[in-house]
Amino acid sequence: MSEHTLDARNILCPLPVIRTQDAIADLAPGDVLHVSCTDPGAINDIPTWCRINGHEVINIDQDGREIRISVKVGATE
Amino acid sequence: MSQRKAVALISGGLDSLLAARVIMEQGIHVEGINFFTGFCVEGHTHAIRNQDQAKPKRNNALWVAEQLGIKLHIVDIIEEYKDVVINPKHGYGANLNPCLDCKVFMVGKAREWIEQHGFDFIITGEVVGQRPKSQRADTMPVVAHESGAEDLLLRPLCAKNLPETLPEREGWVDRDRLYDFSGRSRKPQMALARQFGFEDYAQPAGGCCFLTDKQYSTKLADLWQARGERRYELDDIMLLKVGRHVRPRPNFKLIIGRDEGENNFLEGYRKQFTHLRSTSHKGPLVLLDGEAGEDDLELAARLLGRFSQGRDAPEIEVEINRGGATSTRRVKPLPPDEIRQDWYL
């Protein structure tokens, strides 16, 4: 298992979702991806994308305008 | 026999939701594909304006996929899509919407996708006669042919009005359990949605693309004219969605934030533009797009004054940042009768 980061700040949905999707395509099941974003829409969109594609959101933090979403890669990708 | 697989073009609207569900009912494995062009109404503006903060911030394509219980693949086609917008073979609709070329392009991308992923056919929520350009009896075969999808393209909601496709001929799909919807009425779709138990689905009046919007198209045409060429970058088309766009002179325009949300969004772009803000009164962040001389900066500062809380003050102070260098000037806000209506894009 390894941890990775993705900077998806200052782009608007669905781009943070697309960047997350593309990053996860290169990761292994069990890996964790920490996504930083600033579009509040990502708080809903990234978890929805994770639910329908078999990944798990393990944490969401918000500090001012910045949102950090941690995703554990599922086995189905 | 292994389970057949179809990819459904999912826009986030009702028709694609129903089309996918109709095929899932027949035991086909369906996954969704959604193309991001940069012009999608979806998602982009919902987070920007203060007045939109209370609206649900949901991506409708993702919502549809979750309702259906299918995977959704979102594909970034921003770069490739430029040629569709700039050089549409079949021309534009009422505005700068290249709907027929767009559909050909998207179905063509879906055809490439099914080849790469081992899927059998493509489904869309198209209905004969629903859209004035892209969904007509005479243009539907154009989409199937020019995309290269041919008879791998199945439109479940109006299939009975169209020639049989491969999935029907091969018996993967039962044609009798497809539909014969046509025309612009939404009643058959709404009835089918009720039958499936779908509620709260999105029904955007102008579709899901900014290019169908008259005001947006006017701003894009203005951008092309000002630059002397028909091209754009993603940042350009994002900025056309935000703020008040005012072109007082041919050589420059101003993008004026309308509220705190838009000002915050424009902040992210200020390093790329000459920008102005009032230091004496609350007001917008203003980006200046173009080449401006001293006289132009004076006019820009006075226009800013008009949209600031100092609009009735005899003078306001404006800070101008050009290429990292900051200067300050005091100006009289422009009175309303000196702002021509045709400056507004």
Image (cartoon, coloured by chain):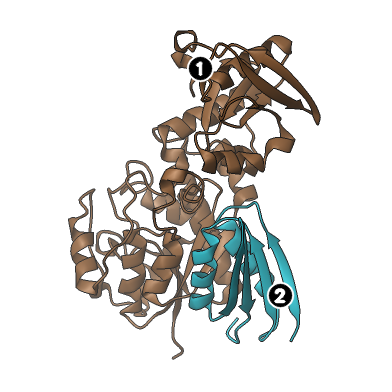
Q: Quadrant of residue A63?
A: bottom right
Q: Closer to the camera: disc 1 or disc 2?
A: 1
Q: Which residue is under mark 2?
A: A26
Would residue B233 be found to the left or right of residue B119 on screen? right
Chain assignment, label 2: A
Q: Where is residue B92 in the image (x, y as percent from the top left)?
A: 45, 35
Residue name at image x 41 percent, y 36 percent: B93
Chain letter, colour cyan in render: A
Q: Position of residue B189 (x, y in %)?
A: 23, 61
B334 over B168 or under it: above or below: above
Would residue A12 be found to the left or right of residue B208 on screen? right
Would residue A39 be found to the left or right of residue B204 on screen? right
Q: Which of B310 and B158 is in front in this view?
A: B310
- Could you say whether the residue bearing mark 1 is in a helix, strand or loop? helix
Q: Nearer the viewer, residue B286 or B164?
A: B286
Residue name at image x 57 percent, y 15 percent: B248
**Residue B87 visible in the displayed image:** no
Q: Quadrant of residue B161?
A: bottom left
Q: Which residue is under mark 1?
A: B343
Q: Where is residue B183 in the image (x, y as percent from the top left)?
A: 23, 49
Residue name at image x 49 percent, y 11 percent: B335
Q: Which of B182 and B76 is in front in this view?
A: B76
What's the amino acid at mark 1?
Trp
Chain letter, colour brown in render: B
Chain assignment, label 1: B
- Could you say whether the residue bearing mark 2 is in a helix, strand or loop? loop
Classify mark 1: residues with Cα within 10 Å, few (<14), some (14-19) or many (20+): some
Q: Where is residue B68 in the image (x, y as percent from the top left)?
A: 37, 74
Q: Are marks 1 and 2 in contact (CB under 8 Å)?
A: no
What's the amino acid at mark 2?
Asp
